[in-house]
Image (cartoon, rainbow, N blue to C red):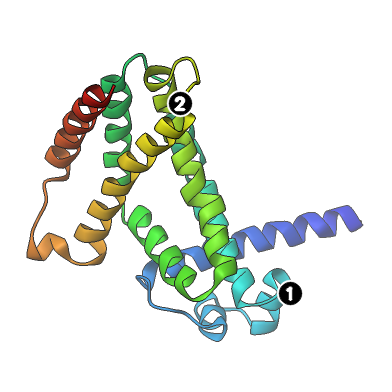
Amino acid sequence: MAGQAAARSGGRKDELLGELAAIAVAERSAPVSLRQFAIKAGVSEPTLRHYFADRQGVVTAIIGFFAEGARDWLKRSAEPAGSVEEAVRGYASLALEGADTDTFAQAHAFALVESIHDPVVARAYLDLIVEPSLTAIEHRLAPALDPDGEFPDRVRHGAISLYAPILIAVVHQRLLRGAEARPLDMGAFFNDLSELFAHGLKLGS
């Protein structure tokens, strides 16, 4: 009986978490109070406190929800390639897939806004989304960029150098309304980024 009750409680928590994540995306980065989360989710504040303790718990749980939703994407991102060009082009293709969804941009926006004000949330964002993304790129680049494992820092630098412009392009276009001020052909951008990145690594080798 206790096990069944725990399972029901976990199922309700997961269901509620999905609703809260949808609210976070719909609000487009605007801060949402615990009371507002409760109202929009159709539950009481005590219910949210029961499952998540406080607003910080809600926010970190939402970030974890976004991370869980990206698990398959990260797995594909980490697939190694035989050459730097192949690794970069493959990742750029996956990044374009993610950039075409509002959830990708809004998940980062939500986590960034919340992280500015709360170091605990910032660490959750780092541990659950940013670091796994960088680690996936490292796994993809390492066989071609550092096959003998002698220069891990170079692989790390390559991962950051590839991840950063993709993230800022998405932020520019979708969050800062750059698509209105200076539209960017994301497909062309990712193609050029692949060529420039691979060419730069060749020059540095």
Answer with left or right where residue 162 lies relative to residue 130: left
Q: Quadrant of the N terminus?
A: bottom right
Quarter of the figure with residue 178: bottom left
Query: Residue 193 appears at what percent x and percent y?
Result: 19, 37
Answer with left or right where residue 24 lies relative to residue 105: right
Q: In this view, does 196 lie above or below 189?
A: above
Query: Residue 190 appears at what percent x and percent y?
Result: 20, 38
Closer to the chain start, of discs 1 and 2, is 1
Residue beneath the point at 76% across and 58% down: 8
Residue beneath the point at 42% across and 26% down: 140
Near mark 2 (Cα within 10 A), the count class, few <14, some 14-19 or many ≥20, is: few
* Residue type, numbered disc 2: Phe
Quarter of the figure with residue 191: top left
Mark 2 sits on what residue? 151
Disc number at residue 106?
Answer: none
**Residue 100 seen anywhere in this rendered image of the structure:** no
**Residue farthest right in this picture:** 1
Tell me the SS state at disc 1: helix
Tell me the SS state at disc 2: loop
* Residue type, numbered disc 1: His
Near mark 1 (Cα within 10 A), the count class, few <14, some 14-19 or many ≥20, is: few
Q: Quadrant of the C terminus?
A: top left
Please state which of residues 103 and 198 is positioned toward the viewer in this rendering.
198
Disc number at residue 50?
Answer: 1
Query: Residue 115 appears at what percent x and percent y?
Result: 48, 68
Residue beneath the point at 26% across and 40% down: 96
Query: Residue 16 appears at what percent x and percent y?
Result: 60, 65
Residue beneath the point at 45% across and 72% down: 116
Answer with left or right where residue 188 lies relative to residue 9: left
